[in-house]
Image (cartoon, grey):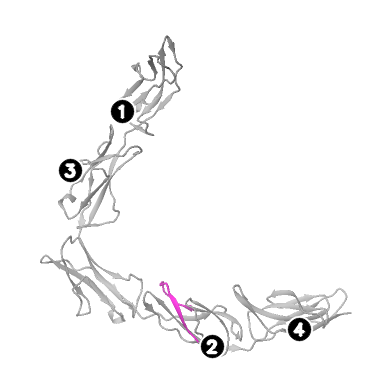
């Protein structure tokens, strides 16, 4: 048993034809028998059902009779009839309100619309079918007002008419907008205020601005180069066209702030910086703009990023500024680094004699500075080379039980920055009794 049309879904109201196909019957003249819910099934190979309903759902099988013999019954064909598709009208645009002069689009949506394409009918102004489910309306025409319904048709299937859809009331609007629309405007930037009239249709407008400036333009754009704090204030506009004025727009409040001033910090907040130490300076700017950076220093190869990795030297002075969206910040205050001579570690011992099975406490320290972690070095005798036996001890305290010649050093930095080491300490020799 086969089905025409062979759609994945059959809806109530459609016409379908079940066909009993006997393959291999040669020249035999067959009559047909159908097994189904319907007592009045045909004796032909085709079983046609007009305007199917859910009650036509069920199992269908057939067999043939010819030359005084019956074929076997076919496998069951399961027919499922679904409730007819439903149409609805929706407004494609989600914004509100709708302004006079805009074009809006209504959409006819049909649920359970798998299968061939629909042809659509609209109940407003024109009864002619349209190939698309979208219906465009210009809000400046009389066609905007009214009630809308739609339906769809394909082959022998017709949906019911949708519910009535009424378009929302129109609004006229005039407003002032700002470009660039940043949350903060700083002195020295260039801004453009725009007077937007929505719902004006094809009207040719001239514009009037209400502001502190007596020389305001008559165009829709009000451009201010190099704004200053004196440009702060309330701005509103209105349009004139066809011998009439619009209302004044709501006030737009423009606030111009003094340009930003960056600050320079360094990544490791140690009280002392030593000559030859590698440190990272940071140019910090408060504000959401994406900045590129400029550094002012003795080194001509300064970066354009917010971080500047340097090797500390004598009399180094640094300042920075940012550039973003055609805006420069002020230069930061100068940062002058005070650089000290590279320090040496100091190693002390609780005793220099190791008793049998005993231990000695060694303490490594750096006077007058912070941020160090300590390494302990040892060699077996004066003629051997130093070997590092303990590392990264923040307190610098080491407990040892082997004789030998000991020294230590401090290091700080790491985690992406090179470690800076002190000079190696004095030596302490431990002996066993």
| Distance Cα–Cα, label 1 vs label 4 | 104 Å
Q: Return the mark for residue 126.
A: 3
At x 38% / y 29%, what residue is drawn? 80
Q: Nearer the viewer, mark 4 or mark 3?
A: 3
| Residue 269 appears in view | no
Q: Quadrant of the C terminus?
A: bottom right
Q: Assign a secondary structure to mark 1.
A: loop
* Rendering coords of residue 419 (x, y %): 64, 77
Instruction: Indicate yes or no whether the magenta region holds residue 296.
Output: yes
Q: Nearer the viewer, residue 331 or 63?
A: 63
Looking at the image, is mark 4 or mark 2 nearer the viewer? 2
Q: Which residues are magenta?
A: 283-297
Which mark lies nearer to you, 1 or 4? Answer: 1
Residue sitting at the far front: 27
The residue at which mark 2 appears reads as 316
Name the residue at the bottom extreme. 315
Which residue is pictured at 46% across the width and 86% down the height?
333
Q: Residue at x 76, y 83 (%)?
A: 348
Q: Quadrant of the N terminus?
A: top left
Q: CA distance from mark 3 to mark 1?
A: 29 Å
Mark 2 neighbour class, 10 Å CA radius: few under 14, some 14 to 19, many 20 or more? some
Please provide percent x and percent y for residue 408: 73, 81
Q: Which label number is shown at residue 15?
A: 1
Q: Any mark on residue 348, and which?
A: 4
Residue 152, given in percent of the width and then of the height, sits at 27, 38
Q: Earlier in the sequence, mark 3 or mark 2?
A: 3
What is the quadrant of residue 372 in the picture?
A: bottom right
Residue at position x 30%, y 38% in the image: 86
């Amino acid at each position: 048993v086969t089905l025409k049309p062979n759609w994945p879904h059959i809806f109530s109201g459609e016409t379908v034809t079940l066909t009993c196909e006997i393959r291999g019957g040669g020249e035999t003249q067959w009559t047909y028998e159908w097994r189904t819910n319907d007592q009045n099934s045909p004796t032909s190979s085709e079983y046609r059902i007009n305007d199917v309903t859910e009650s036509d759902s069920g199992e269908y099988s057939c067999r043939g009779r010819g030359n005084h013999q019956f074929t076997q019954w076919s496998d069951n064909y399961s027919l499922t009839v679904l409730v007819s598709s439903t149409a609805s009208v929706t407004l494609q645009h989600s914004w509100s309100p709708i302004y006079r002069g805009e074009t809006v689009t209504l959409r006819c949506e049909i649920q359970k619309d798998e299968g061939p394409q629909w042809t659509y009918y609209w109940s407003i102004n024109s009864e002619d079918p349209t190939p698309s489910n979208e219906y465009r309306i210009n809000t400046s025409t009389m066609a905007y007002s009214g009630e809308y319904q739609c339906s769809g048709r394909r082959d022998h299937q017709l949906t019911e008419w949708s519910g009535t859809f009424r378009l929302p009331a129109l609004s006229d609007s005039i407003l002032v907008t700002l470009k660039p629309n940043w949350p903060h405007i700083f002195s020295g930037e260039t801004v453009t205020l725009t007077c937007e009239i929505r719902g004006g249709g094809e009207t040719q407008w001239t514009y009037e601005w209400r502001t502190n400036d007596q020389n305001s333009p008559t165009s829709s754009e009000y451009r201010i180069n190099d704004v200053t704090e004196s440009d702060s204030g309330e701005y509103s506009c209105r349009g004139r066209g066809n011998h009439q004025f619009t209302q004044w727009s709501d006030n737009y409040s423009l606030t111009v702030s003094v340009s930003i001033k960056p600050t320079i910090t360094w990544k490791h907040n140690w009280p002392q910086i030593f000559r030859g130490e590698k440190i990272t300076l940071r140019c910090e700017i408060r504000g959401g703009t994406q900045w590129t950076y400029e550094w002012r220093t003795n080194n001509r190869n300064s970066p354009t990023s917010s971080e500047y990795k340097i090797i500390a030297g004598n009399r180094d002075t640094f300042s920075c500024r940012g550039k973003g969206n055609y805006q420069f910040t002020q230069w930061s205050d100068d940062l002058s680094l005070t650089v000290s001579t590279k320090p040496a570690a100091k190693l002390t011992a609780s005793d220099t004699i190791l008793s049998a099975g005993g231990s000695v406490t060694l303490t490594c320290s750096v006077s007058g500075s912070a941020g160090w972690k300590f390494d302990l070095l040892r060699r077996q005798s004066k003629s051997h080379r130093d070997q590092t036996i303990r590392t990264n001890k923040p307190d610098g305290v080491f407990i040892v039980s082997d004789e030998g010649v000991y020294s230590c050093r401090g290091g700080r930095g790491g985690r992406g920055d090179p470690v800076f080491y002190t000079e190696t300490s004095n030596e302490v020799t431990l002996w066993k009794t």
